[in-house]
Image (cartoon, rainbow, N blue to C red):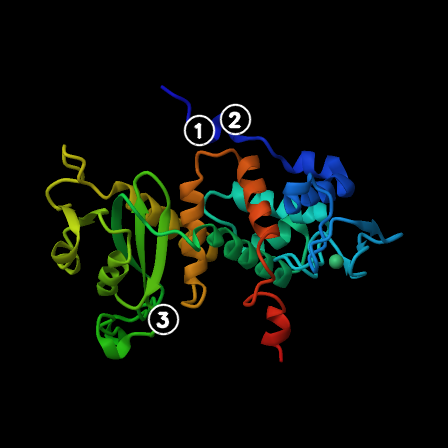
């Protein structure tokens, strides 16, 4: 039997040991190589694009010889005004991509001995950066579509007499959301957080014309047939038909997302659900790449992602 990919040596190309043994200078060089990949790691001024700069003595800063502005390897990126060392940041990314079901901010803060707030914001910034990979992409080809509810759980009362009918609208918490996922069989997984599964139809219509859809028997997908080339699988009869009709791939995504939400985050507030959905999709899509490949792809993406509008200064605003 073939060895599972994650058990193979090829899956392990980066370790915490190598990051900390390499030290702060080597970690910063890694950041420079990935930020300025077109110039082999040589600094490029983020203000004017000039290639000539001088290091500022005693500081991890450069001074642009054209516009005189000071900048660092993280200026203008999602890591701007970082508080963590380069080694700790690299270690955080290593732990983040190694965790196949995601990682909670609490766990990361313990692993790296940093504040919970720091770990919380860092994880969300990384999720924002990885989602940007798909910012300009449109699903195409053979696409499996499905939806699932998350959040809004109401704990049943201890005594039976006090229990309520949790299906009734007046007892809903308003925190339930649906994740609709479109998973390309030969590519990526696109996720959307909406109020009801019926909105999945409008999302499907935005896919590249000529795409073929695969959906389960749920009645809200009936309307897909009117607009799009659609194949259905009735799970009460079979999980997969010989002609390739199944939704197994998109269901793998939802298994991962469920494990992430229940196993790592324990509950999820509706405002962050899109982040976890994007995170699970990214892990699913890159599950066959080595952990080093994933870490450097994520770091490279984050260093080419502008300062986060949502997560920069998050706690300062939250406490204002
Ligand atoms: Zn400049």
The residue tagged 1 is 5
Nearer to us of marks 1 and 3 is 1
Q: Left of 30 or right of it: where is 3?
A: left
Q: Which mark is residue 212?
A: none
Quadrant where the C terminus lies?
bottom right
Query: Alpha carbon of mark 1 to alpha carbon of mark 3: how far?
Result: 37 Å
Instruction: Say whether disc 1 or disc 3 marks the residue closer to the N-terminus.
Output: 1
Q: Is mark 3 within 8 Å of ligand 1?
A: no
Q: Is mark 1 within 8 Å of ligand 1?
A: no
Is disc 2 surrounded by few (<14), some (14 to 19) or many (20+) residues within 10 Å? few
Query: Alpha carbon of mark 3 to alpha carbon of mark 2: how far?
Result: 41 Å
Q: Tell me the quarter of the picture where residue 105 sits.
A: bottom right
Q: Is the C-beta separation of discs 3 and 2 under 8 Å?
A: no
At a point 43% along the width and 67% down the height, the residue shown is 269
Image coordinates for residue 111, horizontal then vertical, percent? 63, 48
Image coordinates for residue 218, horizontal then vertical, percent? 16, 55
Which SS class for mark 3? loop
Q: Tell me the quarter of the picture where residue 164 sits.
A: bottom left
The residue nearer to you, when weighing 73 against 253, is: 73
Q: Is the C-beta separation of discs 1 and 2 under 8 Å?
A: yes
Residue 182 in sight: yes
The residue nearer to you, when weighing 275 against 154, is: 275
The residue tagged 2 is 10
The residue nearer to you, when weighing 35 against 236, is: 35
Ligand 1 visible in quadrant: bottom right
Is disc 1 surrounded by few (<14), some (14 to 19) or many (20+) residues within 10 Å? some
Which SS class for mark 1? helix
Give the vertical position of 149 relative to 55 (above or below).
below
The residue tagged 3 is 175
């Amino acid at each position: 039997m073939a060895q599972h990919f994650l058990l193979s040596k090829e899956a392990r190309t980066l370790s915490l040991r190598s990051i900390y043994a390499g030290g702060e200078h080597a970690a910063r060089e890694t950041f420079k190589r990935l930020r300025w990949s077109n110039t082999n790691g040589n600094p490029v001024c983020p203000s004017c694009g000039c290639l000539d700069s001088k290091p500022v003595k005693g500081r991890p800063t450069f001074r642009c010889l054209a516009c005189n502005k000071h900048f660092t390897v993280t200026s203008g990126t999602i890591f701007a005004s970082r508080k963590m060392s380069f080694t700790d940041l690299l270690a955080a990314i290593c732990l983040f991509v190694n965790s196949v079901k995601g990682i909670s901010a609490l766990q990361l803060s313990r692993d790296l001995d940093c504040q919970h707030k720091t770990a919380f914001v860092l994880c969300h910034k990384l999720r924002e950066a990885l989602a940007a990979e798909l910012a300009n992409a449109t699903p195409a080809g053979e696409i499996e579509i499905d939806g699932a509810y998350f959040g809004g759980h109401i704990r049943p009362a201890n005594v039976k007499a006090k229990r309520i009918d949790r299906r009734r609208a007046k007892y809903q918490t308003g925190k339930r959301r649906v994740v609709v996922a479109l998973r390309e069989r030969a590519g990526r997984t696109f996720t959307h957080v909406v109020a009801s599964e019926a909105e999945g139809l409008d999302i499907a219509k935005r896919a590249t014309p000529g795409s073929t859809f695969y959906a389960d028997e749920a009645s809200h997908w009936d309307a897909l047939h009117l607009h799009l080339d659609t194949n259905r699988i009735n799970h009460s009869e079979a999980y997969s038909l010989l002609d390739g009709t199944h939704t197994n791939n998109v269901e793998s995504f939802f298994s991962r997302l469920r494990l992430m939400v229940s196993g790592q985050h324990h509950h999820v507030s509706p405002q962050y659900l899109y982040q976890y959905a994007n995170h699970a999709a990214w892990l699913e899509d890159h599950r066959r790449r080595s952990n080093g490949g994933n870490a450097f792809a994520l770091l490279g993406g984050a260093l080419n992602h502008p300062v986060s509008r949502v997560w920069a200064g998050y706690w300062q605003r939250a406490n204002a």
